[in-house]
Image (cartoon, rainbow, N blue to C red):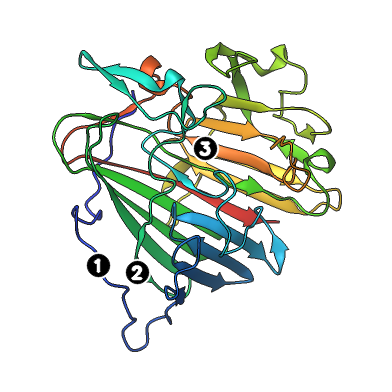
Amino acid sequence: MSEPTPVASVPPPGTTPPVVEPAPGAPPTARLVTSPVPVSGAQVVLERAGYRAEIAGVGATLRTLTFEGRDLVVPFAADEVRPGFRGALLAPWPNRVTDGRYERDGVEHQLPLNEVERGHALHGLAHWADWTIDQAQAARASASFVLVPSDGYPWRLALSVVYELTDDGLTTTVTARNAGTGVAPYGTAPHPYLVAGEGRVDDWSFTLPAASYLEVTDDRLVPVGTRPVGDRDGFDFRDGHAIGDLFVDHAFTDLAFTAVDGAGGPAQEARVTATVTARDGHGVTMSWGAELPWVQVHTADRPEPENDRVGLAVEPMTCPPDAFNSGDDLVLLAPGEAHSASWTIAAF
């Protein structure tokens, strides 16, 4: 089980701070669009150092991210219903809860089944919520949402997210605080589809320093157990290789985290980096910390030609699929406790 990290900056449940205008001399506010409200919710546009990010209120979704006009994630329009989970935040669990059923403290819980064809509860309860934009500046915005107790998940969570552009890309930090009673099971992940450049997934190379992957059943993607990446053709991405027509919809773990300099000086932080590279040598990286020991990778195989393999889903996760049942790396939040996770997407 992952240990929760005390965090004091999460807004109390039920509060809705206004968008903050900057003080004299402070950075200008971001462009904030709230009226008329677009289909995907209130919009925030952030810009810095050649990067431009557009955040949509529904699902606190990363709707677009570009560097010098080049897409780094698969975008969608502000007045479009978000295609699936593209760019959304996933909480209070990532990936699947098998059959939507799990037990906590001797009590059986049944979640709504939103992956109907496989019969699972997929990607949590926050991805269609209309998050409140709390603050917006030129390169930084925050949003929040209170998840109220329900039949399938009877805990109250205060969720918040900060999106911040720096010279080194877009960093997202999501925090959950148990704002109710009882110990709450919790997990989180993002769901971006990374874009390396021209072409589609088949035209790109992928590097991921992961030694193991999670084997799943072919029909319902139910976890079976971890295996070395060398046991499956094409799944060893440690030295990087072309993706080609390989199908991937699996979680990877045993990640090779390495120490990097902290933002404030000599402090060291364990990070791992995944890289997607186009044929011209340009591409996109995604890096994250040890609070996210799993990552789901999906080649976005879809029946619709316009969506088929147009981006590589790279989803750093606090826990593996079906962690509500297995307990593997599941975060358990006592009342008042909080947990934070962050990741960065950058161009090269």
Give the alpha-carbon distance from disc 3 to disc 2, as whole Å: 25 Å
Decide if residue 154 is on the left or right side of residue 300: left
| Residue corresponding to mark 3 | 316
| Residue corresponding to mark 1 | 17
From the image, state whether disc 1 or disc 3 is nearer to you. Answer: 1
Q: Position of residue 14 (x, y in %)?
A: 19, 56
Is residue 164 among what the camera can see? yes
What residue sits 60% from the left and 39% below the top?
314
Q: Callout 1: helix, strand or loop?
A: loop
Q: Earlier in the sequence, mark 3 or mark 2?
A: 2
| Residue corresponding to mark 2 | 135
Q: Residues within 10 Å of mark 2 (few under 14, many from 20)?
A: many
- For the C terminus, the quadrant is bottom right
Q: Are marks 1 and 2 in contact (CB under 8 Å)?
A: yes
Is residue 264 among what the camera can see? no
Q: Position of residue 27 (x, y in %)?
A: 42, 80
